[in-house]
Amino acid sequence: MLQECLKLNKNVLIAFVASITISAISAQILSDQADYLNTTYATVVDYVVYFSVFSGLFYLDNGKKYRLESGKTDTAKLKHDLKKLITSLGVAEIVYTIVRWALQYYLLTVGYDPYLASIVSQGLSTIIYMTVLNLSVKMTRLYKHGN
């Protein structure tokens, strides 16, 4: 159970490092845009990069878990776990999006450089995200024994 949570957290953090980097670059490139557009575009880039990297890493770490001896996929177990994972991620994503967007917009309006506003807002939002995600995983019992 602990090992599964550590793998999940590792995948989330690696995906966030990739998305922080790329969204900061995109925020700076789009610095001529209005603050609300810059924030929105950077957030969209953040999500595209994050979910691409996270999905790939999650599959690499968990693909074998859903294979039957016959080589087929245990779709029932996969669906069951995906529902719990999506619930956990969904709750955390809602909180993350609100905090990230509002904080980056605020930082831009008070004069932060776009790349720095993106990094600071995403960094603080990631801490909150990780807290909410781990609480959600615990509440949904995603990694209980036998799962």
Image: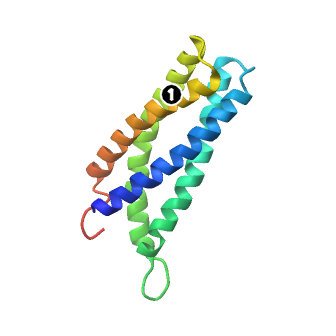
The picture quadrant where one finds residue 94 is top left
Classify mark 1: residues with Cα within 10 Å, few (<14), some (14-19) or many (20+): many
- Looking at the figure, which quarter contains the N terminus? bottom left
The picture quadrant where one finds residue 44 is top right
At which x and y percent is residue 99? 46, 27
At which x and y percent is residue 60? 51, 67
Residue at image mark 1: 121
> Please, what secondary structure does the residue beneath circle 1 have?
helix
Q: How is the image coloured?
A: rainbow
Seen in the picture, residue 6 relative to 124 is either above or below; the reply is below
Residue lying furthest bottom:
70
- Looking at the figure, which quarter contains the C terminus? bottom left
Number of labels in the image equals 1
Residue lying furthest top:
110
Seen in the picture, residue 15 relative to 27 is either above or below; the reply is below
Residue appearing at x 70%, y 17% in the figure: 34
Q: Identify which residue, 110 or 75, lies in the foreground.
A: 110
At which x and y percent is residue 69? 42, 87
Residue appearing at x 24%, y 67% in the figure: 145
Residue appearing at x 67%, y 34% in the figure: 25
The picture quadrant where one finds residue 40 is top right
Left or right, residue 33 beside residue 81: right
Residue appearing at x 54%, y 17% in the figure: 107
At which x and y percent is residue 29? 73, 29
Residue type at mark 1 is Ser
Residue lying furthest left:
145
